[in-house]
Amino acid sequence: MYVKQISVFIENTPGRLADFTKVLADHGIDLVSLSIADTTHFGILRGIVADPDRACRILAEQGYTAKLTDVLAVYVPDKPGGLAAILSKLAEKNVALEYLYSFVRNAGDHALIIMRVDKLEDAVSVLRDAGVRMLTQEDIQTL
């Protein structure tokens, strides 16, 4: 029920993100979702790619520091309060949210949210019990 997220350290210099995306493009790896948190000298790129294991290997070969992390990809009703309801369910069971970011790829009346939580198994159980649809890695490859 998890999705593999790739995290990559990227220097905060002109053209470095362009170089990164070109490596993926040159190897036919689709970048499905992307979030970047930056500082003065570097950024942490977090993203969902169609072939995470291959992407991580190729990026390492190209000199990038990259790692894979299990995250949840969750369908959230795209209406006021949709995200609040899901986050409240997690909070009720003492599951802490470390970060989240959204992506849209033909999701219809739902937003797609990537979540990193401290208690992955607990979060899956809570969300499943609440009837929240979660994507699998295979789902990501067909978006």
Image (cartoon, rainbow, N blue to C red):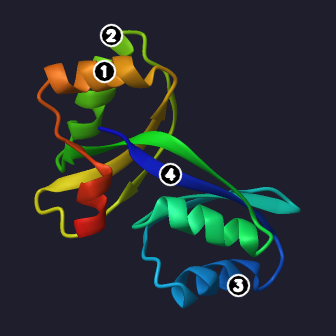
- The amino acid beneath tag 4 is Gln
- The amino acid beneath tag 1 is Ser
Element type where label 2 sits in the image: helix
**Pointer 1 and pointer 4: residues touching (CB < 8 Å)?**
no
- In the drawing, what numbered circle is on residue 64? none
First reached walking from the N terminus: tag 2 or tag 4: 4
How far apart are the two marked residues, 1 and 3, measured between alpha carbons?
Answer: 39 Å
How far apart are the two marked residues, 2 and 1, measured between alpha carbons?
Answer: 6 Å
Q: Which residue is mark 3?
A: 19
**Pointer 3 and pointer 2: residues touching (CB < 8 Å)?**
no
In front of the other: label 3 or label 2? 3
Q: Is residue 48 visible?
A: no
Element type where label 4 sits in the image: strand
Question: Is 82 placed above or below 20 here?
Answer: above
Determine whether, in the image, residue 50 is placed left or right of residue 26. Answer: left
Dot 3 alpha-carbon crowd within 10 angstroms: few under 14, some 14 to 19, many 20 or more: few
Estimate the x, y position of residue 22 in percent, counting from the top left.
61, 87
91 and 10: which one is in front?
10
Q: Which residue is mark 4?
A: 5
Estimate the x, y position of residue 128 in percent, counting from the top left.
18, 26
- The amino acid beneath tag 2 is Glu
Element type where label 3 sits in the image: helix
Q: Residue at 35%, 9% (x, y): give it.
A: 93
Q: Which residue is mark 2?
A: 92
- In the drawing, what numbered circle is on residue 88? 1
